[in-house]
Amino acid sequence: MISKNFIIFALIASFFFIGYMFQNYLMSITVGAILAIATRPIYKVLHLKLHLSHKRIFISSFLTLILLMFVFLPLIYFVGLSSQFIPSISTDQAMQYTQNAVAYIKNLPEPFDVFQESINALLGEFNIYNIDMNVIKSILNKAAGVFLKINSIVYQFFFILFFYFLFNIYGYRLFILITRLLPMVKKFKRILYNETSNTISSVFFGTLFSMVMQGLAFGVFLFFTTDYDAFYLGLTAGFASAIPVIGAYVVILPVVIVEILNQNYIFASLIMLFSMIVMSVLIDNLLRLVFMNYLNKKFSLNYKLNELFILLAMLAGIGVFGGWGIIIGPAVISLCVAFITIYLKSKA
């Protein structure tokens, strides 16, 4: 007979060495697996409705192509465009805008003048006129370098797509194999899968919907009202909307500040009203809620994780894993919640 302890030790050791061999691809594998779980509801629908030979390969290829066209290519384009745009920023113009902003907040209108004394004390510690222009150029060059560095790892995106394609084909078999190793009854395994997959799918589709709609709305608004590069700013606002809490205001507020400094107060107010009413209230709250309710009914994406915990998980995930933490963070938290649920049910 073979010792059970020996088998467990050998299994753990083999997993360790596999992880060691694939350590350079662990992030790509993780993101590919999570994206496959997120889009699993669509895979299931297509798998039921299509009657083709080799339909697993066809569906996996189709979903991979959709992900490439609507997520990865816009991201690659945005990063490449940003790496070219930032160095072209005029340091003299940036300095002038900064000086105008300082001059403006030194003479606040009513009723904001109650903060004037505190603001002047703070500005006294920072002399904008003594800043070396070479420092500003260095900051802009480093910012551009960050985007160039991101652009240089585009190959990682294709590794993610490659693993995403494989997980779509073999993911369910792999899941069955893994669950067979877990010392749990079938009911608990189902809880583990449903809680994790439903949370990941909801976060993924909700974030994607908000990115597309907010970016499109802001870009169309700028196209018909200003001479800004509406396509670039709309794309930037779309990606920025995925950032928890602040979202697209990372892009909107600088535009508003520029308009205020140019004394276009009415248009600056119009931008803020549009962003708050259309982008924040209408799209991010109402339309996204309608969209998610439709998905929940269509694919039964029910989960127990509170929205506040999802938000905190996204923030923590971004801090640890970068941009991919938006989906990795909630995945980790939902896995923990699933195990807590299983534990409580097993003790009942």
Image (cartoon, rainbow, N blue to C red):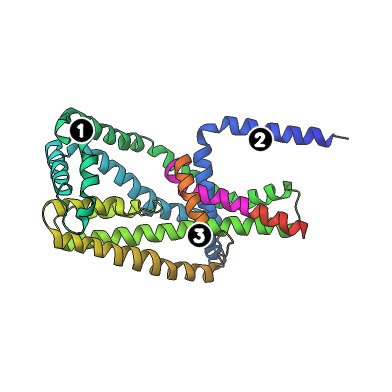
Q: How many marks?
A: 3
- Which quarter shows the C terminus? bottom right
Residue where numbered disc 3 is placed: 307
Above or below residue 73? Residue 18 is: above
Q: Is residue 326 magenta?
A: yes
Residue 235, percent from left and from top? 29, 53
Mark 1 nearby-residue class (10 Å; few <14, some 14–19, many ≥20): some
Mark 3 nearby-residue class (10 Å; few <14, some 14–19, many ≥20): few
Dot 1 and dot 3 residues touching (CB under 8 Å):
no
Q: Which residues are magenta?
A: 322-337
Residue where numbered disc 2 is placed: 15
The quadrant in which residue 190 appears is: bottom right
The residues tagged by marks 1 and 3 sit, at their Cα atoms, a distance apart of 40 Å
Mark 2 nearby-residue class (10 Å; few <14, some 14–19, many ≥20): few
- Helix, strand or loop under label 2: helix
Q: Is residue 177 magenta?
A: no
Above or below residue 144? Residue 274 is: below
Identity of the residue drawn at 47% across and 43% down: 160
Dot 1 and dot 2 residues touching (CB under 8 Å):
no
- Helix, strand or loop under label 1: helix
Q: Earlier in the sequence, mark 1 or mark 2?
A: 2
User: Between 178 and 327, which is closer to the camera in this rendering?
Assistant: 327
**What type of secondary structure mainly makes up the magenta span?**
helix
User: Between 188 and 20, which is closer to the camera in this rendering?
Assistant: 188
Identity of the residue drawn at 23% across and 50% down: 254
Q: Which mark is residue 136?
A: 1
Mark closer to the observer (1, 2): 1
Q: Earlier in the sequence, mark 1 or mark 3?
A: 1
Residue 252, percent from left and from top? 26, 54
